[in-house]
Amino acid sequence: QDSGCSVVFSSRGTLGAMSEPVKKLILREIDCRGLRSADFLTKNDVYVVFKVGTRKVKTKYISGGGKNVKFKDVLELTVSDADLEAGIDVTVWDYDVGPDPDDLLGVGKLTQLTTLKEHPDQKRQFDTKLMYKGKHRGDCT
């Protein structure tokens, strides 16, 4: 089974005041590779946040996930055509317990999502390079 983000559309309902059709985006088989190490003595406790506009969803964190992590989470995100054109922001984090904030591992963007409208019920895979402080710090599919 290939890793990546699979996408299924449902065109029911409306989003916002413009009555634009909404689609249900299903994200699954999320795979992060080559992540930077944020913790000195332990492995990364990784989670991923997907954001479009003001809406966001995130995976559960994987304790001790390290640099290469596969998530079993199935996430749903409601999107419009404008959201598909703008793309989906992806941030990968290292969860930290206690008062310290979580460590950012990398930032990317899923783009070219408008191709999903051509075959709405077909599973697709999208990739993004993860950047941190201007350097390539991993990949997410």
Image: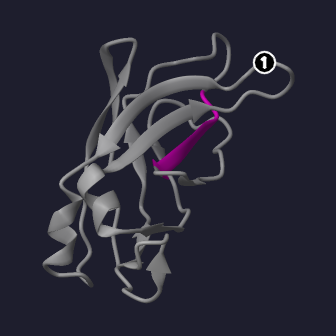
Q: Specify whether residue 46 is painted magenta.
A: yes
Residue 4 spot, x, y in % from top left: 32, 58
112 relative to 100 in the view: left or right:
left
Residue 107 versus residue 32 in the image, above or below: above
Residue 101 versus residue 66 in the image, above or below: above
Q: Quadrant of the N terminus?
A: bottom left
Residue 9 versus residue 65 in the image, above or below: below
**Residue ranking furthest to the front:** 17
- What secondary structure is found at the residue carrying circle 1? loop
Magenta range: 44-51
Residue found 48% across the figure and 50% down from its top = 50
Residue 77 versus residue 45 in the image, above or below: below
Main secondary structure type of the part rendered in magenta: strand
Query: Amino acid type of disc 1?
Result: Asp
Residues 49 and 88: in front is 88
Residue 128 spot, x, y in % from top left: 28, 41
The mark total stands at 1
Is residue 3 at all visible to an observer of this figure? no
Residue 28 spot, x, y in % from top left: 44, 65
Label 1 packing within 10 angstroms: few (<14), some (14-19), many (20+): few
Residue 115 figure quarter: bottom left
24 relative to 62 in the view: left or right:
left
Residues 96 and 21: in front is 21
Residue placed under numbered mark 1 in the picture: 100
